[in-house]
Image (spheres, helix red, strand yellow):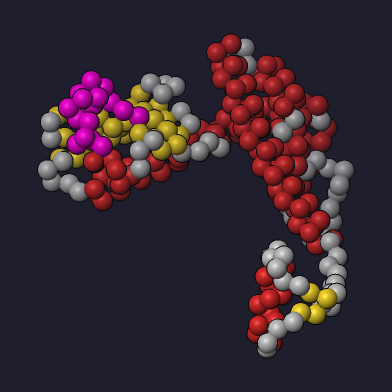
Amino acid sequence: MSKTFKYIQNEDVLRTFREYQGTILSERPVVIARHGDYDLLLEKLSEDTLGLRIMNTEKNFVVQSRSYDINKTTDALVARGVRHACQKMFELNDEEVNRRRMQIWKWYILDWQKANADKTDELMSRELTWSEETFDVELLDMEAFLHGDYLNLGNTLGLIDKHLMDEKQREKFRNFAIADIMEMTSEDTKDRSIAEAEKASQDVKMHTYQFTVSVEATDKEHARQALLRYLAGDERIKVQK
């Protein structure tokens, strides 16, 4: 979930620092990349020192920082540092998405267990064993259940409202669920559209059509060129059909 937005390309960061260290960077840090709740800031630590800082904007704390002496570094070294920082932001955001998603799924499991207390032992036995020969379709398929119910936005928002009493936390989880489910369902829709388009293209039957025309020419190559020009719309070429 979420994509990395880069406002300055990796290879241009050192050049950008040198260009703006006496103006904008003397006043404040500049966001050069963003991923989810994380910003990568370019800042001026001193006249000769470039700083890169990862900030969690929601919790307002520094995750990681590093610095470079601009007289001793290169574009490639700074670019590598920016690339690593962007990868770090991606990993941190991915961890948070999975943690929040799994918390909602735990609430689904708790509700299901309360409603199906008599099936708990059967469910545990099924999840802890495997058989190629038998498959009980009546027994809950946990993965399918969670995936299907989780993607039902109304069900998931109702579940969040039920289990979270703190208004701030409830709003945070509601916003997360809406963004996550919309992204997941848009990918499903895109995949279906691609599959349907591929199937439609396979169902189209190709036919062969033959047209016979005559054209006056000095030789075969001359005739071929004349026909090509005719097909391209050259009205000067006369043909007999």
**Segment colored magenta:** 16-31
**Of 34 and 111, the residue lying toward us:** 34
Question: In the picture, residue 7 is in which quadrant?
Answer: top left
Q: Residue 150 in magenta?
A: no
Residues 227 and 45: in front is 227
Q: Residue at x 69, y 44 (%)?
A: 190
In this rendered view, identify the residue nearer to me: 191 or 232. 232
- In this rendering, the answer to whether 11 lies above or below 21 is below
Q: Which residue is more in the foreground, 238 or 151? A: 238
Please state the horizontal and vertical placement of residue 183, each as a whole percent of the image. Answer: 63, 35
In the image, residue 24 lies in the stretch drawn in magenta: yes
The x and y percentages for residue 227 are 71, 75
Quadrant of image for the C terminus: bottom right
The structure residue drawn at horizontal position 46% and vertical position 28%, both measured from the top left corner, is: 37
Q: Quadrant of the N terminus?
A: top right
Q: Is residue 153 left or right of residue 65?
A: right
Q: Quadrant of residue 50?
A: top left
- Relative to 173, does residue 64 appear above or below in the rendering? below
Relative horizontal placement of residue 43, taking residue 56 as reference (left or right): left
Residue at the (28%, 35%) spot, across then down = 52
